[in-house]
Structure formats: C-alpha cells, structure tokens
Image (tube, rainbow, N blue to C red):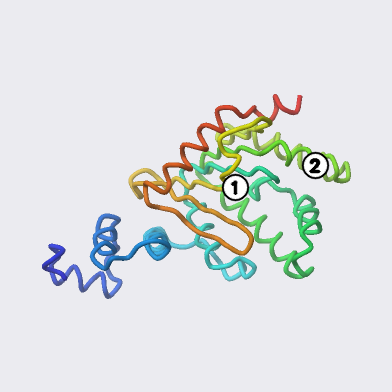
C-alpha cells in the first residue's frame, strides 16, 4: 500500500501509530484506496478534522449523541456558520425559557434530560458566540413560522426571545433574516453549513438533524446543493429588524 500511494514506510507507520497528523489530501487518498464511501467516508473525514483541531467536548455533554458532539467541535472552530431553520429559533439563539417551551411542546424528554439539554445548549452558545476572537460569522435564515409561534407563548418568554434575536443580530458578525414567502429551501428541511478556518479544510460540512437521525455531508457534490439553496433563500429573506418593524 505504501508504494501504491507513494508514501514512505515511515510516513505510513507514523499515520498508523497516530503520531503524524493526517492531512486532508492523504485522508482522501487513503479512503479512496480502501473504497470507503458514503456515511463512513463523512464520519472518518470529520474525525480527521477533529483530531487536527482538538476537542472542546467535555464530559458534561452527556445529553448529546456522538454525532452531535462531532458537530459541536466543528462548530466551535468554524470561520462561518450558515443556518436554515424554518420552524423554530435555532439553538444558538434560544433563551432558556424558549428552550423550556419547545421541550414542553415536544413532550419527549424527562425533566432531568431536559435540564441537561438546556445546560449544554447554553454552554454551546457561549463556546461559539463568545469566542475570544469574536466568534464566527453566523448567517441565519428563520422561517416566519418560528416568529409566529412566539406569539403563542407567554409575553415574557416571547419578548425575551425577540430581544435576544435583535441583540445578536446587531453584532457585526451575526446576520438573522426571516423568510416569509415561497423560497428554494421549502423542500430541503433544516440544515447547518459549517465553514472551517481558511486553509484547514477544502469544503464546508453540512450537518443534517432529523427525528432520531443526524448526518454529515462533506463531499463537494453533496455539499454544493445546500450552499446554493442557502444563498438563494438568504437573498430573498428579510432582515429580522425589518421584518419585526
């Protein structure tokens, strides 16, 4: 294999022993050599990136599945995060009271698990939005239904959540828009695009989360449609301050 890939025996041995970081091109060639595709390909490429960056996940994240913890690490180091969520306020922007309201509506977690989820989500917000470098650029498109649902909550909960959205949207690196018309993402479902720091990864990672299912997309031809959809939806959406005024 070393000869076939043009590697020295020393280099291959270092990779196998875990004493040499696996660069992206090396990882791609190795996975191609072993005919690794699909979800296994995406998972291993995610692990490569996390191994290069180090992990911000702690033992406190007990409420978060493995796939979710991988996403948290990618998100914590991101240069840009693009979020599309049609039905509710994305986790990065949620207040604790809003989290409680959503959990009550879902009626799918125990009180203890609910508390763990809320604690971990607040920690995630701090990790991403309060980074020492000012945090990543965050572009978010929320469906108008998410704003409409707020009107059905107690006024204190509603006003606190709207205030948080406005305060965050006023940051120079955060953009929050609301889409209130037919748009290209209507059939896509929610998704997040994480763009790693320049030079560390060639393509962004798309994170998809559904009912009991979480997955990553990293291959350029799989990521491209989501990037295209996001840009098109972002273009037709309205700034949240304009929408609320």
Quarter holding the N terminus is: bottom left
How busy is the neighbourhood of tag 2: few (under 14 within 10 Å), some, or many (20 plus)?
some
Observer-side mark, 1 or 2, equals 1
The residue at which mark 2 appears reads as: 150
Q: Residue at x 11, y 68 (%)?
A: 3
Place of residue 123 in the rendered image (x, y in percent of width and height, measured from the top left): 63, 57
Callout 2: SS: helix
Q: Residue at x 40, y 65 (%)?
A: 40
Q: Residue at x 55, y 28 (%)?
A: 235
Callout 1: SS: loop
The residue at which mark 1 appears reads as: 190
Q: Is residue 176 left or right of residue 66?
A: right
Q: Is residue 95 left or right of residue 91?
A: right
Kindly indicate the quadrant of the structure image that contains residue 110.
Answer: bottom right
Q: Between disc 1 and disc 2, whose residue precedes?
A: 2
Q: Residue at x 47, y 51 (%)?
A: 77
Q: Which mark is residue 7?
A: none
């Amino acid at each position: 294999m070393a000869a076939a890939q043009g590697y020295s025996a020393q280099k291959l041995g270092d990779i196998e022993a875990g004493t040499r970081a696996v660069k992206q091109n090396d990882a791609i060639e190795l996975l191609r050599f072993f005919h690794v595709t699909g979800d296994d390909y995406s998972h291993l490429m995610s692990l490569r990136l996390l191994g290069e960056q180090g992990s911000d996940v702690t033992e406190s994240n007990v409420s978060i599945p493995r796939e979710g913890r991988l996403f948290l690490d990618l998100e914590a180091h991101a240069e840009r995060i693009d979020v599309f969520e049609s039905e509710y306020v994305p986790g990065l922007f949620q207040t604790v009271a809003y989290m409680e309201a959503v959990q009550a509506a879902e009626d799918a977690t125990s009180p203890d698990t609910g508390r763990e989820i809320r604690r971990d989500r607040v920690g995630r917000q701090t990790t991403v939005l309060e980074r020492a470098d000012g945090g990543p650029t965050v572009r978010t498109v929320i469906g108008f239904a998410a704003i409409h649902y707020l009107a059905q909550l107690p006024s204190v909960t509603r006003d606190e959540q709207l205030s948080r959205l406005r305060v965050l949207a006023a940051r120079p690196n955060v953009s929050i828009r609301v889409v209130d018309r037919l748009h290209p993402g209507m059939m896509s479902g929610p998704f997040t695009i994480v763009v790693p720091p320049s030079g560390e990864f060639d393509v962004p990672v798309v994170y998809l989360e559904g009912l009991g299912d979480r997955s990553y997309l990293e291959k350029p031809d799989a990521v491209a449609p989501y990037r295209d959809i996001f840009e098109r939806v972002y273009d037709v959406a309205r700034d949240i301050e304009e929408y609320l005024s």
